[in-house]
Every structure is written in C-alpha cells, then in structure tokens.
Amino acid sequence: MLRYRRYRQAASAYWAINRLVARAGSRALLQRLRHTPRQFSWSLRYAGAVELLLLGTPSRTPMLAEQIRNPLEQATALTRLTHIHRQPLQTDQWAGEWITAPHARTDRVILYLHGGGYVSGSPHSHRALMGYLSRHSGARVLALDYRLAPEHPFPAALEDGWAAYWWLLCAGFSAQHILVAGDSAGGGLALALLLALRDAHMPLPAGAICFSPWVDLALTAPSLHKNQATDYINPVILRTTAEMYLGQHDPHDPLASPLYADLHGLPPLLVQVGSAELLYDDGRRLAQRARRAGVAVQFEAWPGMVHVWHFLYRIEPKARQAVQSAGRFARRQWGEQDGRQETQQQPAQQPAQRQARRLFD
C-alpha cells in the first residue's frame, strides 16, 4: 500500500510538471508570435524555461513556507545530472552531502550554500548545478543542508555555515584549498560567512563564488523595479522570505545583508549577475563596494540572463559558459595552471569582462 501511494504521488507530480511545461511553452510561443517577447534576444527554449520558472514562483500573499518550497523542488527535478557521485554526510551539528564529478580532486573543496530565500532549497534541489561546478572546477563540492526559516530564522543558516567550514578545517583541509560558493540567498550567506570568519580572525578560504547573490534584504536595489518584466522572481516573494528569515531583526545587519558591511580583508570574489534579473543591482553594488575596500573582484554581468540562470545549463549556452567561468576562477585561486590557460581560450567571456571594466574604470 505504501509503495502504491508513493507511485501515485510520483505520477501526479510528473503530470503536474508536464502540464506546467506545456503551458510555459505555449506562453513563450504566443509571445513570440505576437512580437512581444520578454527579451528579443532570447531563444524560444530559454524563453519557455523562464516562463516555466515564472509559473512556479508564488507571487501572492499570504504565502506559506511550503508554498515556496514545493515549486523549487519540483522545478529542479527537471535538472538531474548523471555521472556524479553523491555521498550523504551527517555530523552532530549539521547535515549535507558530498557531490563529486569524475576526476575531481579530493583535496580541493567548494563549500556550497544553496539559494531559496533562506526558506526553501536543499542539496537535492541544487544537485545538478553543484555537479556541473564540481566538473568544471575539478573539486569536490560539500553541499550544506542548512536550517531554513521561518522555523530557524537568522542567524541559524550562518551558524550552520560556520560549523561546516570549521568541520572542514578540523578534517584536515587547508583553508587555501577551500572555496565558498552560493546562489541567490546562498551567495549572500557565503559573504556573511566570510565576514564572520574575518572578524573572528579565522583562516579565510581561497575565495568565494556568488551566483546572483542576494545581499540587500532591505530591498533597495533599483533593478527590483526595472527588471520586473523580465525576471521570474518577484518583489513579493523576496519581501516574504526576507521577513521569514529576519523576523524583527534589522535588515541592514551586515551578517544578514553583506552589502552594508565593511568588506576589507576578504578573499577574491567572483560575482555573476544577469542583466535581466531583479537582483542585478545587488551584485553590481556589492562588486563596487568590494573593489573600493581593496578586494579583488571578478564581476561578470551576463546580458539577458535572469536570476540564477545557471540552472538552465542544459539549454542555455550562457549558463554553461558562466559555470565554466566559475570553475576557472576556482582553479586560479588554487594556483592551478590550467585555470589560466582556459581563461585565455574563452572569448565568450569578453563581453562580460568589458562591462565589468566599464563599471569600475
């Protein structure tokens, strides 16, 4: 009976996702026929994927945590990756899993903090993205299953990140062989972890990778309004998840919103944002402030891309190029020669680099 119930649930979820895919594809095609696409430069496949994400993103209040969590898990079920080794990891303080691509080195680690507004997401939802990152960086990825709000509000996620980083050091990994990475809220959490480690005079990792980082929970970015017509996330879900995570806590606290922190002394950062996403100005302002504080920053603004477009690795060339760039960044921080060689062989990165120079020069 239990097996039959699970089969029915899986079948129901499968058909629900397929109905959503069909609806999203129809919307993208109709926009194209009417000559009113969200972006004229988008391929039909990419436009359909954005519509799918938009249809699955809650946008009305009141909003419960489960209404935020379920769509993310369902949508990312379509991004499965084969040929990776997964090993669950459980300690007394936190849980997670190792993600290892073929030929990845076991003495290099990326501590990955998933996105989801501090309310949703898991190692399961981000497994494919972490697998691709493991492949291109040549390193193992430790996916932290940190505690989620509203059951565990700020600073629970940061405490779990600290515990996982400390565990890596105690397990014998050199800080210079560790990178911290994250997307969206996980990108903000990665920076908060760096700040906490710096202020505690702990050994800092070799660098940090931030995909579409959410670093301003006060929600002051101009792009929150400018890019509403192109991105699939919306101000309502950002405001709701910020409230669930913060409770009555000040959104300007640097450990909640690293945009307001003194960023001096941090290791090199890679910040990738899409020009069509709501959080574009979060990443842009973060990169500017970090540069002014003397931090080495590689800022990449990808034209026409939406929030964490990296999830669309299998259908969008710019998603693959962005993850490849992150892999090269990781290799460079570890002093590996092939990272420098690959950088010279990737002309696809030149537009992003030119845009970064215009912002900072």
Image (tube, rainbow, N blue to C red):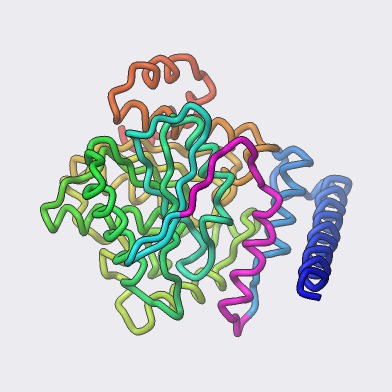
Can residue 281 be seen at all in this image of the molecule?
no
Judge whether residue 282 is colored magenta: no
Q: Quadrant of the N terminus?
A: bottom right
In the foreground, 126 or 347: 126
Q: Position of residue 319 (x, y in %)?
A: 59, 37
- The quadrant where residue 91 appears: bottom left
Q: Position of residue 269 (x, y in %)?
A: 32, 40
Q: Residue furthest front?
A: 1
Residue at image coords 27%, 59%: 162
- The quadrant where residue 185 appears: bottom left
In the foreground, 361 or 49: 49
**231, above or below 67, in the image:** above
Q: Position of residue 334 (x, y in %)?
A: 29, 29
**242, above or below 83, in the image:** below
Q: Position of residue 320 (x, y in %)?
A: 58, 33
Q: Count the labels in the image.
A: 0
In the foreground, 218 or 91: 91
Q: Would residue 10 appear left or right of 243 to someone viewing this image? A: right
Residue at image coords 63%, 62%: 73
Q: Would residue 18 appear left or right of 278 to someone viewing this image? A: right
Q: Quadrant of the C terminus?
A: top left
Can residue 175 be seen at all in this image of the molecule?
yes
Q: Would residue 153 appear left or right of 127 to someone viewing this image? A: left
**312, above or below 10, in the image:** above
Q: Which residue range is magenta in the image? A: 61-88
Residue at image coords 67%, 37%: 314
